Amino acid sequence: MPPTSLPVRPDLAGLTPYGAPQLDVPVLLNVNENPHPPSAEVVADLAAAVAEVGSGLNRYPDRDFLALRADLADYLGVESGATGLGAENVWAANGSNEVMLHLLQAFGGPGRTALSFAPTYSMYPEYARDTMTAWVTGRREADFTLDPEHAVAQLREHRPAVVLLASPNNPTGTALPLATIEAVAEAALTTGPAGADGAPTASVVVVDEAYAEFRREGTPSALALLDRYPHLAVSRTMSKAFGLAGARVGYLAAAPELVDVLRVVRLPYHLSAVTQAVARAALRHRGALMAQIAELRAERDRTVTWLREQGLTVADSDANFVLFGHLEDRERVWQGLLDRGVLIRVVGPPGWLRVSIGTAAEMAAFRVALQEVLGL
Ligand code: PMP
């Protein structure tokens, strides 16, 4: 090959792709997956649904996937009591990562800003980078909660086109009270960039509820605020509670006018016929797929209690993972666990590690390994 150099975008030069190590070890507790595979009965039904669309795969799929969007709207109604949602309120893509990329493609861009509050999900700055949107972060408090006054001040200062609020937050597990989201959504009515007429637009407020189904009793979903705020979008995924990370299905609920803007930036036929069929079949089996949520929540609470009993600091968690710390050398602890067949994640502020909630047996293996590594 002749010597040449590629015209790599200067801001991408030397960067490596995002992603936790994918290692083949017995106990995988590093990417917040659901440890329970779909049952043989559910797998058979997913396969039947794929077989049914198989003979039509020479054709492009339904570009607007209205049937799936209606099913997802129904599910949100059952799960969160969000009434009045229809297909026109829902958008979906290949994982909620793609849903949120669509949001940044539609509302971000050069000269615009996206705002979030650190520590938070490490993909957010990548959506911003990939859409050439400026990225700014405000702070979370020492216990990882969000001070609504600070949040509103940040909106007024940075005038973001998009605000990303993860609730429960990754990697901390912290859920936001509805009052905090309300304060941000209220302020956001006029904190967006100037519109064509020079008047301020709204900031789009994205509440990323990837882990919402694991929230503790009494923590409401931001879906409850949707009918009041046309600039609010609530993002969800089938990767976590549904245990379908491999199917790649994420979605959001918002006002139809917001959803219609996302339809402009999506690639045509971005959601394959196979994905649509699998997602719809999985929604029919949601009872079976989500049966283990209560058990995972209980296992999470037990893990928090146990870690505290070991003298560790643990963030309160409404998710299927737990952030624990003040470890002097977290890399050593992570490696020690890995040497014992337990893979967790180095993420969060220095001195903290995150463990996903697995089966009871996996959590027992984690506890034994951690006691050995920490000499407890
Ligand atoms: N949001 C948060 C907070 C996450 O932790 C993740 C996955 N780790 C996602 C979104 C994206 O998940 P998916 O693309 O599988 O829906």
Image (cartoon, helix red, strand yellow):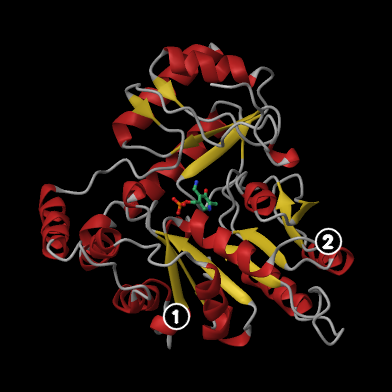
The reply to whether discs 1 and 2 touch (Cβ–Cβ < 8 Å) is: no
Residue beneath disc 2 = 150
- At a point 35% along the width and 26% down the height, the residue shown is 27
Front position in the image: 248 or 234: 248
Distance in Å between CA atoms under marks 1 and 2: 29 Å
Res. 376 in view: no
Res. 322 in view: yes
Tell me: 27 left or right of 154.
left
In percent of width and height, residue 164 lies at: 66, 60
Mark 1 Cα-neighbour bin, 10 Å: few <14, some 14–19, many ≥20: many
Q: At numbered mark 2, what does the secondary structure look like: helix, strand or loop?
A: helix
- At a point 21% along the width and 68% down the height, the residue shown is 284
- At a point 80% along the width and 83% down the height, the residue shown is 196
Amino acid found under the numbered disc labelled 2: His
In percent of width and height, residue 253 lies at: 49, 74
Residue beneath disc 1 = 82
Task: Farthest residue to the front: give it.
Answer: 2
